[in-house]
Image: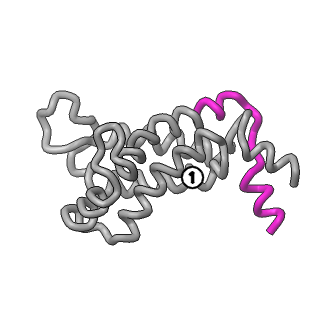
Amino acid sequence: MKHLVKTLLTTNPNIGFSIARLALGLVIFPHGAQKLLGLFGGNGYSATMDFFTTQMGLPSFVAFSIIIIEFFGSISLILGFLSRFWALSLAGMFIGIIYTTQLEHGFFMNWFGNQAGEGYEYSLLVIGLAMTILVNGSGKWSIDTIIAKNQ
């Protein structure tokens, strides 16, 4: 078990990986805050759960997981805490988003409002950043680094 924890928390102390982690966390945080707290013009937890389960037909567990991953995962990424876990969670979530809502609309985002939905280019960027973190860890200045040193 100790080996698993050390593997999960060990990180490449490169500032570039810290930048990737911070960028991903800062971009995802407002989306999670919209869904959980109703900040940034969001509808909050109850309305988001209702939308995901009723209108999108997602199971309650999946809807709840999306909210938790976006909110707590983004904060954890910003802090560099269990970054590999949260990066994997975000990559999996965005693969699901591509499959369930974006694939049918093609590659490009709906910049000009002339298509029925969003393409998957943004999601690919999120997955790319998440995979960078998954492979390399939190980078410099992370809680993971502090914990790994004390193992």
Q: Quadrant of residue 34?
A: top left
Q: Main secondary structure of the magenta part?
A: helix
Crowding at dot 1, Cα within 10 Å, few <14 / some 14-19 / many 20+, comes out as many
Q: Is residue 85 magenta?
A: no
Residue in view at x 63 percent, y 51 percent: 84
Residue in view at x 26 percent, y 57 percent: 47
Residue 55 location, x and y as percent?
19, 62
Tag 1 secondary structure: helix
**Location of residue 68 with respect to 106 vertically, above or below:** below
Residue in view at x 66 percent, y 52 percent: 82
Residue annotated with mark 1: 86
Residue 15 location, x and y as percent?
70, 28
**Location of residue 31 with respect to 52 vertically, above or below:** above
Q: Given the image, on which type of amino acid does mark 1 rest?
A: Trp
Residue 112 location, x and y as percent?
17, 28
Q: What quarter of the picture does the N terminus occupy?
A: bottom right
**Location of residue 139 with respect to 144 vertically, above or below:** above
Q: What quarter of the picture does the C terminus occupy?
A: bottom right
Residue in view at x 57 percent, y 52 percent: 86
Q: In this image, 132 relative to 149: left or right?
A: left
Q: In this image, 116 relative to 142: left or right?
A: left
What's the magenta region? 1-20
